[in-house]
Image: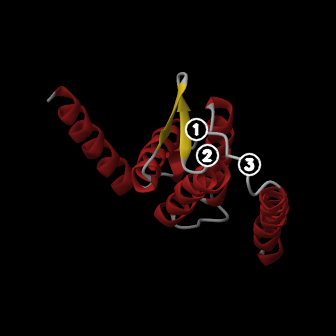
Amino acid sequence: MSFKISRFFVIPLILLSFLFDANLKFNNANANVKNSPANKNDLDIYYVMGMSFLCNATRKGFDLDFEKTLSVASATFASQVEQKHGGKIKVGKKEEKVDMKQLQFRVAMQLIESALQVCPNNVPEKVEKRFKIETERLKKLKEL
């Protein structure tokens, strides 16, 4: 059992270390090159990785805490945008600097929404209830 759990964490960590190592070497070699903003394709990749991590880590057998795992997944997403793209996202034809806390919150909400569709058994009831309350609050704010 512990071998499965350690294998589950070790392989992604090794892959992430290669990603960060390659990113650091790229950044050092291109220190004066402007980071390009994250485009839709970049964001989709980071999102799918976060969704996969969230559903896999919280499934039966691993049973990691959903809220902590969600926090790690959304923080990793925001961190990638910050480090790799200078905190900028391409929206239409223009680029915008995003607030990392707001980005992390929006990604967490999207991940919960997707988890409710993809792996609903992994989402605790209290998280689902808070998600519904927060979505209603956001809808009301948009109407103002």
Q: CA distance from mark 1 to mark 2?
A: 9 Å
Write down the residue under mark 3.
33
Numbered tag placed on residue 118 in the rendering: 1
Q: CA distance from mark 3 to mark 2?
A: 31 Å
Circle 1 — which element?
Answer: helix
Circle 2 — which element?
Answer: helix
Q: Nearer the viewer, residue 42 or 61?
A: 42
Which residue sits furthest top? 93
Total numbered labels placed on residues in the image: 3
Residue drawn where x is 24% and y is 32% of the image: 139
Of the two numbered discs 1 and 3 on the same chain, state the one appearing first in sequence.
3
Write down the residue under mark 2.
51
Q: Residues within 10 Å of mark 3 (few under 14, many from 20)?
A: few
Amino acid type at mark 3 = Val
Of the two numbered discs 1 and 2 on the same chain, state the one appearing first in sequence.
2
Residue drawn where x is 79% and y is 63% of the image: 24
Of the two numbered discs 3 and 2 on the same chain, state the one appearing first in sequence.
3
**Is the residue under label 2 in contact with that under label 1 (CB below 8 Å)?**
yes
**The N terminus lies in which quarter of the figure?**
bottom right
Where residue 98 sits: x, y (%)?
45, 46
Circle 3 — which element?
Answer: loop
* Image vertical order of residue 52 relative to residue 38, above or below: below
Q: Nearer the viewer, mark 1 or mark 2?
A: 2
Q: Residues within 10 Å of mark 2 (few under 14, many from 20)?
A: many
